[in-house]
């Protein structure tokens, strides 16, 4: 970890902020309006304004801002009436939140293996996982790379399944001329500290029907309904509201996003071309039909035998110790302790899940297990650096082959 943190100093700091961000926060403090209030009785205006600005950025009709990306997935599922005993298909290669949000609704995640080149959910494997209890799919656009949403939506429409896109990595990603978050019933975004659009924490749900937007809003604001009496609670809900502080920073950060997004995509293409020329290195392949990626992380897969049998840990350490910030990829969900012993929520029967005990063996998830064993990722701020710095990364990776 110390080497990795030290290596980050060689690349642009993240988050990137200026006096405009500081002034936005100062204005919230000085206003005395530290929370958003309600739709018909605003206390602050930043949350309401951000919802409009973010939905416009992503090409959606409705946006509900929340306190983080995990509850964004949960709230979207709750708005779609996913609950007790329902099964929800989730890719095995993702952050735990994609599945823990399903657990939070008392539903059961079912893990799907990935495509070895795009590193996202393999749509061809979905139908084999569907049972009479399946109610939804949560495709994850890992690293900003869109899941192949066109055939996925054909399956979902045919079988009457809900789709909540996990877009935590995919701000600005475009697949087949449509921004992600607009393919399914809803799209869930994160604004956590390392994300390409950040306020430290925060999240949002996008959708394109007023009915669903209203149901999601009611859930995240204590069961209230828009423009009804403040102490009337019409359904079960909780408090996942975004703060004015988060929204104020997001409104200034969103102005910086287009320029940063363009640079990330330009540099990602450059780095992909250079690294893919190295025998034994493969970068994440953009899904066919993708024209723009969020590039939250930049995953690469290496072949140990082409690097003298080097392990992933050795590969990662050599990069970090030589000034190249490198992280591990997410461990597959089936390998996490919480899913090896299926005892997550009292009273829920997880026996039909495709994980737990012997079912959590890597043998049952061959692609993701292999990819995880020989992959690493570069942080998104590396893609904001100069071409010269990117060339240094490529040269060092080449040198590892010579050392071996």
Image (spheres, helix red, strand yellow):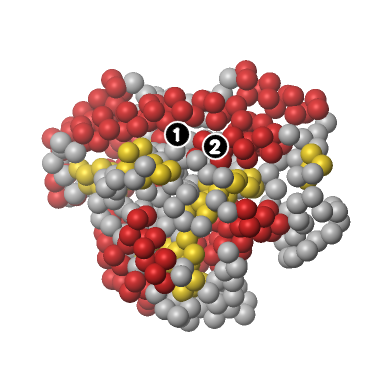
Residue 396's disc is none
Question: Foreground: 300 or 84?
Answer: 84
Q: Quadrant of the C terminus?
A: top left
Residue drawn where x is 60% and y is 68% of the image: 81
- Which quadrant of the figure contains the N terminus? top left
* Vertical comparison of 363 with 21: above or below: below
Q: What residue does disc 2 label?
A: 56
Q: Does 123 sit above or below residue 342?
A: above
Q: Nearer the viewer, mark 1 or mark 2?
A: 2
Expressed as whole percent of the image width and height from the top left, the position of residue 320 reads: 35, 35
User: How busy is the neighbourhood of tag 2: few (under 14 within 10 Å), some, or many (20 plus)?
Assistant: few
Give how far across and how far down residue 348 sits, in percent.
Answer: 58, 78
- Residue 335, quarter of picture: bottom left
Q: Give the label on residue 5, or none.
A: 1
Q: Earlier in the sequence, mark 1 or mark 2?
A: 1
Element class at badge 1:
helix
Q: For numbered disc 2, what is the local secondary structure?
A: helix
């Amino acid at each position: 970890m110390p080497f990795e943190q030290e290596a980050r100093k060689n690349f642009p700091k993240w988050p990137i902020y200026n006096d405009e961000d500081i002034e936005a926060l100062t204005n919230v403090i000085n206003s005395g309006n530290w929370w958003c209030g309600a739709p018909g009785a605003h206390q602050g205006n930043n949350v309401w304004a951000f919802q409009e600005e973010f939905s416009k950025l992503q090409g959606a009709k409705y946006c509900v801002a929340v306190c983080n990306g995990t509850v964004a997935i949960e709230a979207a599922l709750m708005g779609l009436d996913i609950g007790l005993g329902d099964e929800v298909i989730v890719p095995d290669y993702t952050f735990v939140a994609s599945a823990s949000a399903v657990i939070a609704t008392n539903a059961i995640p079912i893990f799907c293996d990935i495509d070895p080149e795009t590193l996202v959910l393999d749509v061809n494997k979905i139908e084999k996982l569907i049972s009479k209890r399946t109610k939804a799919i949560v495709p994850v656009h890992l690293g900003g790379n869109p899941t192949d949403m066109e055939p996925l939506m054909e399956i979902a429409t045919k079988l009457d399944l809900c789709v909540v896109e996990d877009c935590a990595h995919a701000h600005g990603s475009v697949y087949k001329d449509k921004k992600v978050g607009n393919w399914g019933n809803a799209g869930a975004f994160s604004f956590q500290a390392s994300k390409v659009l950040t306020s430290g924490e925060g999240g949002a749900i996008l959708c394109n029907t007023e009915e669903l937007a209203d149901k999601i809003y009611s859930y995240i604001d204590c069961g209230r309904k828009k423009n009804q009496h403040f102490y009337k609670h019409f359904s079960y809900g909780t408090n996942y509201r975004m703060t004015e502080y988060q929204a104020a920073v997001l409104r200034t950060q969103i102005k910086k996003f287009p320029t940063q997004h363009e640079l990330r995509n330009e540099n990602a293409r450059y780095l992909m071309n250079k690294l893919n020329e190295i025998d034994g290195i493969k970068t994440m392949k953009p899904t066919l039909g993708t024209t723009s990626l969020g590039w939250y992380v930049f995953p690469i897969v290496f072949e140990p035998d082409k690097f003298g049998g080097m392990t992933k840990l050795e590969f990662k350490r050599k990069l970090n110790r030589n000034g190249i910030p490198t992280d591990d990829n997410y461990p597959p969900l089936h390998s996490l302790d919480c899913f090896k012993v299926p005892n997550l929520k009292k009273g829920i029967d997880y026996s039909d899940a495709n994980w737990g005990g012997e079912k959590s063996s890597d043998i049952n998830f061959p692609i993701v297990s292999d990819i995880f064993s020989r992959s690493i990722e570069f942080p998104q701020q590396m893609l904001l650096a100069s071409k010269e710095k990117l060339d240094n990364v490529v040269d060092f990776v080449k040198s590892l082959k010579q050392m071996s």
